[in-house]
Amino acid sequence: MNIAVVGAGRIGLPLAAAFAGRGHDVVACDINTARVEAINRGENPIPDEEGLAELLAEVVASGRLRARPDTRAAVADRDVVLFAVAVDVDHEGRADVANLLAAADEVAAGISPGTLCIFDTTLPVGTTRSTIAPRFEAAGWTLGRDVYVAFSPERLFMGRVLQDLNRYPSVVGGLEPGSGDRAAAFYREALGNEVIQLQSAEAAELSKLAEGVYRDLNIALANELARVADIHGIDISEVARAANSQPFCHIHVPGTGVGGHCIPVYPRFLIQGEGPSDLAALGRRVNDSMPGYAVDRLADMLGSLQGKRALILGLTFRPNVAVTHHTNALDLKREFERHGAAVFGHDPLLSEEGVRSLGFTPAPEPLSGYDVAVVHAYHGQYDSLPWGGLAPLILDARNALDRSHIEAQGVRYVGIGRPPTPA
């Protein structure tokens, strides 16, 4: 097949490489000309995406994958166009689909009759039909005859996209049955994986929101249970282990909020749509409150944070991936500064300029001499940190550390819902 992937970012580029790796002719479209040039040289712009460097070099060298900045021209001979354009929330917490609509307009102006267009960016329910599809009609195409439109949400985890492509079934839903059928057939051929075909694009849109909101609410529950555990001096990790031994229970790990492109965003797509969303909104409030709760707890333990030096380790939204989108490290910084502390940031995945661009003062090497340190994203590079000289108190913001290892170096440990080391 001839395939175009619009958006050669953290999801789109691995998708394009995977399609090409299965023998399809693929063009990756992106307005970032520097990224396009790097891809065409076989260079991997996403070094923390496992397996991508080797696959990309192979499919570019074979000629099965190339990148272009001119989307309109690139899609003219494509059988299938897949959209992997990021959608975020605006200042009012509503989906900002401006970039996706601009991409749809470019594609609508360039495609040939019979093209299948699949949108895999998570959207509020009804967006594919009510907002995106009319752009094709405005370009003169008749839906279900000249152009086929379907929604198929990506179900991928940054850092392991290539592995996840065949780990979970593809979910598809078309604007009409013919589009859904074509999208299902495409994924069976393009990826060779299982396909779950739903009755409509709206059903597929809601299925992805259901996944994300479930996780956000589960984390909110874990956070509430952790706060109860703190009151009673209980370790939430052993509570969750006991509860999760029952097969109907799956309590997640508490922490200082939820970051990234997905989980803190998708509940807002549900909130802005039709139907009840009180629970989704409540989950967001609980998770958004956790950075403040954690820093307040540190202030109580130390008596005050005024004038203290605080170090935040790991500024990305999760470990081992260089993505800072909606990172809670910024929320922790805000809360420390509210208490009058001086805040320093460190992240081995970011350049010094990258640390500064987030508003942090870069922590000088060697890391030592702080009053309190917070492990926000526990990157693999932190395994060998000399905790003893770092700070006398460590907050494990994701309950990711081995507390016995920290305490063995003479450092006080405290986690989210985990009792502190006695003073």
Image: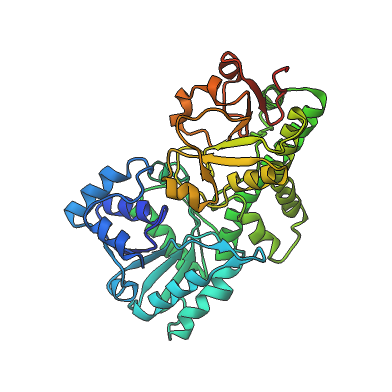
The residue at 77%/55% (across/down) is 278
Residue closest to the far front: 307
Closer to us: 3 or 203? 3
Residue drawn at 52 percent across, 70 percent down: 175
**Above or below 314: residue 207:** below
Does residue 179 appear left or right of residue 281 in this picture?
left
Who is closer to the viewer here, 198 or 162?
162
Foreground residue, 416 or 75? 416
Where residue 292 appears, as percent x and y from the top left, is: 72, 43
Identity of the residue furthest to the left in this view: 62
| Residue 323 in sight | no
Residue 209: quarter of image: bottom right
| In the image: residue 185, left or right of residue 306 | left
Q: Which of 249 and 122 is in front in this view?
A: 122
Q: Where is residue 79 in the image (x, y as percent from the top left)?
A: 32, 68
Residue 73 in sight in this render: yes
User: Where does the image place residue 44, in percent across and percent down from the top left?
Assistant: 30, 49
